[in-house]
Image (cartoon, rainbow, N blue to C red):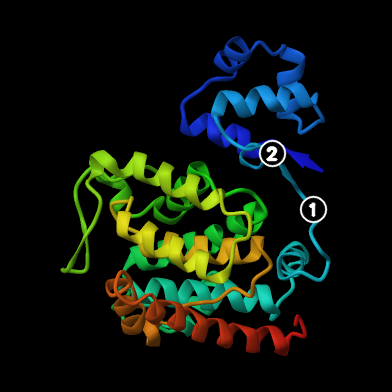
Amino acid sequence: MFSYKKLFLLMEEREISKEKLKNDIGISSATMAKLAKNEEVALSTIQSLCKYFDCQPGAILSYEKEIDENSILFRLREEQDIKLKGGLYHQTQVRLAYNSNHMEGSRLTEDQTRSIYETQTIGVTEGTEKIDDIIETVNHFRCFDYILTVADKELSEDIVKHIHLLLKSGTTDSQKEWFAVGDYKKRPNMIGNMMETTHPSKVASEIKQLLKSYRENSNVTFEDIVDFHYRFEKIHPFQDGNGRVGRLIMFKECLKYNIPPFIIEDVSKEYYRRGLQEYTTEKGFLIETCRAAQDVYKKLLEYFEYI
């Protein structure tokens, strides 16, 4: 099936409305409606659009295949729909939420994370748990469900921002006037105490450019996804939650391109952080850390007979 989603993402990036596009290249409302519905349009319309945006057809047009019933994405969605207990979807929800949150300072154990997912209770406590840790765990489950919903879609600013909105909603941070939940940061920040990140005034333009260059890749590989992750983290577009949003995006993109996904485990966080810090001089360290994580997830896939 033809899809013009890339066209509308390009329009969004360049802040071109449907009305402006219609007027500038002289297409009818009926043709615009066909584009919005992913219906076939005249070759002359495609040529006019390419000339207007100074691009090749692949930048505005794609062909979407039906999701393979043997793909990991199809299986995860199936288990999600039937609410299967103990399967790959269940295990991924718990492991991804626990490890990604724990890397960022959550005090919840994996057993407590599992209890929240399975029983909506925290289980055995020692009185040191923070309310935000619990909220963000529940929110992370929602984020994972969301990326399954949009996994086969082109990555966009709306998707990136919505993941952040889901992750940080209802937290203490969300009650701060200056903290922009679901929107880009308003104050400068750093990765740890060493890596400088993009200034708030430049975040929107740099994210647009990052997404544009990534979408232009016609054959996305594992290495491309890791590279995108580094560049996303270097921008650090949100006030907080960048690591978790970035790792969810990597999982989503692996599913989109039917690449075995992976979970960076808390025990590997120092290798992961070193990989980010040294990426400009030695890409291999981050890539190999992610490859090792992929090998672990592959064992889970093998156990459930998905590969």
In the rendered image, the quadrant that contains the N terminus is top right
Residue mark closest to the camera, 1 vs 2: 2
Residue drawn at x 69%, y 35% as measured from the top left: 4
Residue 212 seen in the figure: yes
Q: CA distance from mark 1 to mark 2?
A: 13 Å
Depth check: give the residue in front, 191 or 164: 191
Residue labelled with disc 1: 65
Percent position of residue 201, x then y = 24, 39
Q: Mark 2 — residue?
A: 61
With 277 as the anchor, is 228 left or right in this view? Answer: right
Q: In the rendering, at what x and y percent does residue 44 appear?
A: 75, 22
- The residue at the point 35 percent across, 39 percent down is 205
| Above-or-below relation of 215 to 141 | above
Residue 189 vertical position relative to residue 191 in the rendered view, above or below: above
Q: Residues within 10 Å of mark 2 (few under 14, many from 20)?
A: some
Secondary structure category for the residue under label 2: loop
**In this picture, is 7 found above or below 208?**
above
Q: Is residue 108 left or right of residue 17?
A: left
Q: What amino acid type should be assigned to the residue bearing mark 2?
A: Leu
Q: What residue is rendered at 72% in x and 13% in y?
A: 29
- Tag 1's secondary structure? loop
